[in-house]
Image: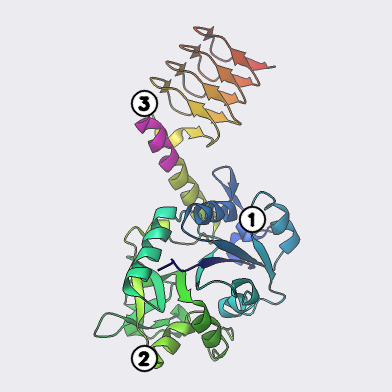
Amino acid sequence: MSSPTITAVLLAAGKGTRMKSGKAKVLHELFFKPMLHHVLDSVAAAEINTTAIIVGHQRERVLDTLSRYTFTPVYQEEQLGTGHAVLCAEKACASSDLVMILCGDTPLIRPATLNAMINQHKRSNALLTLMTTRLDNPFGYGRIITNDAGYVSSIVEQKDADNTQRAINEINAGIYLVDTGFLFTALKQVGTDNSQGEVYLTDIVAIAADQGHKAHKFMHETAIDVLGVNSRIELARAHQELQMRHNQEIMLSGVSMYSPETTLIAPECSIGQDCVLEAGVQVINKTTIATGVHLASGVLLDNCSLGKKCRIGANSVLRGCTVPDNTAIPPLTCKQE
């Protein structure tokens, strides 16, 4: 039996008012690229066949950043809610068995998490699976209401929840995997009778339950992986998380870091084994570093090539430099080639 085909639908049409910015939210950068690109990279690495991106606010600026990605653009002329946004993608999803819906402001989502959700959905032969997580403070998130059998009966948004429902700490992570036919049939039944006057995507869960279907949940315990970025504070936290993930990979490859939380290494750079990086080091723009190099605190390397066993003194700034093996660079050196 062949595996079902999946189209990922990324919601990237919103303005993001809490960012306090003239720039569309999904274009705000963290760890060297816009947050939307991080989501797309995870989707591309997962078991997903095609991708559609829903754009609205500043759509041309958003699309201009996506030349290296393969996707179908979908235009949401008016921002009438997440359910309306997905409805706009009906044509783009017509040839797929399943639709995975994600938000373009979740840059920490991992391909392994998406694949785990897909595999659970297939094993359970589900019509609808939604990702959930738990928060100590769930304020602002839709609460997961389950029935006695453990299936999801509905999702109640913060503004529509009563006190009992607001006490629930299991929340909607905003990622869905849904049978294509059911999804668009259900969305056409969703009204706007809520505090926002919008078409809530979450209402498809209650529709499934009302029709006697089981709405499955995929619980992901690590909340930071799946939560959206809605403010500059959350953007900084997400950047730090991606920075630490990358630094952990580098350290596991045989590199020592005195202060990994202050060390910034671009993904396209390479660092050989037995290198030592002191606090505050930055390595960017395709820099390559051979084995046994020592970078003192505050060093900045921009598009450089360093040979074996070089020593770069504290607070030096090198741009476009090629440094031979065994070279010692004095502290406070500023050099551009």
State the residue position of label 3.
254
Q: Where is residue 100 in the image (x, y as percent from the top left)?
A: 49, 68
249 inside magenta stretch: yes
Distance in Å between CA atoms under marks 2 and 3 = 54 Å
Q: Which quadrant holds residue 283?
A: top right
Tell me the SS state at disc 3.
loop
Which residue is located at x 46 percent, y 41 percent? 243
- Looking at marks 3 and 1 on the same chain, the residue that comes earlier in the sequence is marked by 1
The circle on residue 70 is 1
Whether the magenta-drawn stretch holds residue 6 is answered as: no
**Whole-percent x and y of residue 59?**
72, 63
Is 27 displayed left or right of 224 in the figure? right
Q: Do the residues labelled 3 and 1 touch (CB within 8 Å)?
A: no
**Residue at screen point 61% across, 31% down:** 285
Q: Tell me which amino acid carries mark 1.
A: Thr
Q: Does 280 sit above or below residue 30?
A: above
Badge 2 or badge 3: first in the primary sequence: 2
Going by the numbered disc 2, the residue's amino acid type is Gly
- Kindly give the residue lying farthest to the left in the view shown: 148
Callout 2 secondary element: loop
Q: Can residue 216 be seen in this view?
A: yes
The boundaries of the magenta stretch are 244-257
Residue lying farthest to the right in this orientation: 60
The kind of residue tagged 3 is Gly
Foreground residue among 5 and 316:
5
In the rendered image, which residue does mark 2 sit on?
212
Residue furthest out toward the front: 1
